[in-house]
Amino acid sequence: MKNRNNESSNGSAGHYVQLQHIYKTFNKGSINEVPLFHDFNLTVDKGEFVTVVGSNGSGKTTMLNVICGSTQIDDGSIIVNGKDVSQLKEHQRASFIGRVFQDPGKGTCPSLTILENMSLADNKGRPYGLTPGIKKRRRDQYCTLLEQLKLGLEDKTDVKVGSLSGGQRQALALLISTMVPVDLLILDEHTAALDPRISETIMELTDRLIAEKGVTTIMVTHNLRYAVEYGNRLLMMHEGGFVLDASEDEKKTHEVSDLLDLFNEISIECGN
Amino acid sequence: MGIIIGIIRNILEEGSIYGIMTMGVYISYSVLKFPDLTVDGTFPLGMCVTAALISSGVNPVVACLIAALCGAVAGCVTGLLHVKLHIADLLSGILVMTAMWSVNLVITRGSAVVPFYNMDTIFNSGPVTLLPKGLYTWRVLIVSTVATIIVKIILDYYMKTKSGLLLRATGDNQQFVTSVSKNPGMMKIIGLTIGNACTALSGSILSQVSESANINSGTGIMVMGLASVIIGSSIFKKVNILSATTKVIIGMILYRACLAVAMQLGLPTNYLKMLMAAIFTVALVANNTLSKEKKAYEKPE
Ligand SMILES: Nc1ncnc2c1ncn2[C@@H]1O[C@H](COP(=O)(O)OP(=O)(O)OP(=O)(O)O)[C@@H](O)[C@H]1O
Ligand SMILES: [Mg+2]
């Protein structure tokens, strides 16, 4: 087991996402000040599938928010595909990012039908003008996509998404997030709210989609087995920094129990 | 018999004219989940603009369109205040509504009531003159129904376009809109623009019925619109063949019917606004009880 610091290197060809010298303190200057990132660095290469584990409050979601633009940083630079995106708004960055949240409600619109949700997502990157929102011709294509979920959603295309179960909504959200080609896929505990069986199905689907599209992926999970089994790089976070960065080869030598040991170790260190 | 027909006709006339406003409130409140108080200012704005234009000899249809445009601008300002300056939704509406008071006074040159008798309106000029004599008493109902249906068709079409779907998505889940790389703030501004254009148009048409504009006519518009939206959508919740816009128009007709019945039973006019608030309260409470039941039913997954 080797601890490695992420050295930031500017504009190197293979580096897809680079977080350089990120500083972030929540509620700065108030009593509830939460200093989280202090010179935080991360480099993810093109095509990498990174799994991230870490204790509650270690800053995993915040790291993803920083990349996506939902959280403003105090200092540092965020470089995606060689371009500094720090100044871009969240919706502007979304043009090349697909994202699935822990909350199944966040990825879909409950009062729109499955078909309407998919049509909207399918139009990402193009203008949303006064042309009809649903193209009848695409229905078959959408059904084919839904069939691979094996949840029977292809027969419910005109059903409002709000009446689906959490697992069904999450599966749909995952499908929707990659409907148009994205360069970066961000998954934040996207199987956490699901029962073990559906969770397994969604995880397999995730893996298949990522392999199919070859999209660079960062996946946060609390499931240590998923973290070891999937992906080709493993990060463990603690108190706004990394305590483990294992490459594909190193990762193969890790067992879930090793990770658990390390997890306990850091937890004991800070006395909880 | 004649009296009853007269009352019913009156209810339908007012129901369809205010129905246009209700569709506007439906867009801001039900679709966008934005309680928009601007409408209390844009309704009289539509009236005042129409009065000014028609008095100076502008074609009444053009006057309607310009009134709608003015309402659209006011709605846009509310949206900008909320989205760009991060002012709370209710407050943004109140700010613009308050400012509208001055705008309306400037348009009417300081008078509270502006009559424009004996001028061309949509009810006595243009296509209406082709109606047979026997239908003369029905002309207001015919014209206002046609206007309402035109607005309804346009809105129904818009709701099915890409932009319309995105508008519905904005009220539903802003994160989703962000995820498809669109700015939800922009969609809110668009929605408020449409909503207030409808409201001002509604005011414009109503002023042409009475051939006068009243600067005080805005009080309670939001309450009236909202009540009709809630009445219409909860009564016809299960009726899928009716479009949402039709439901809220019927809601408004029912609402006007309640008011008319109360007046016929001898309720003094002074109590009208009180009655409006009371109906709204009942509709709200009934709707809350219904949705609570629904939630309790939906909980165990
Ligand atoms: N908007 C916010 N305001 C204040 N503090 C925040 C905010 N967001 C996050 N924090 C704090 O930052 C720290 C990291 O939070 P974050 O959500 O990134 O943790 P996480 O690793 O995703 O945890 P979990 O595993 O529970 O999801 C926590 O201490 C949290 O309290
Ligand atoms: Mg988290």
Image: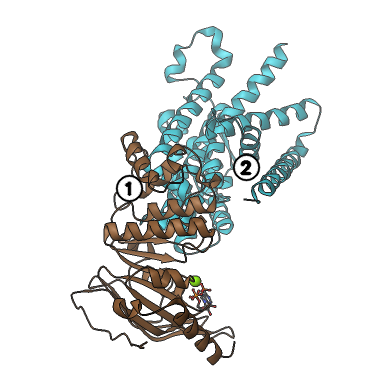
Chain colours: A brown, B cyan
Question: Looking at the image, which is closer to me, A151 or B264?
Answer: A151
Q: Residues within 10 Å of mark 2 (few under 14, many from 20)?
A: many
In the displayed orientation, state which residue is furthest to the right: B266
Q: Mark yes or no: residue B207 visible.
A: no
The residue labelled by disc 1 is A123
Q: Are marks 2 and 1 on the same chain?
A: no
Badge 1 amino acid: Asn
Q: CA distance from mark 2 to mark 1?
A: 33 Å
Question: Looking at the image, which is closer to me, B131 or A7?
Answer: A7
Q: Mark yes or no: residue B12 visible.
A: yes
Secondary structure of the residue carrying numbered label 1:
loop
Q: Chain of mark 2?
A: B
The dot on residue A4 is none
Q: Which of the 4 quarters of the picture holds residue B178?
A: bottom left
Specify whether B30 is left or right of B128.
right
Image x and y of residue B7, in percent: 69, 20
The residue labelled by disc 2 is B226
Q: Residue at x 68, y 15 (%)?
A: B5
Q: Residue at x 54, y 86 (%)?
A: A267
Work out whether A190 lies above or below A165: below
Tell me if the residue at label 2 has its CB under 8 Å from ligand 1.
no
Q: Residues within 10 Å of mark 1 (few under 14, many from 20)?
A: some
Image x and y of residue A210, in percent: 32, 60
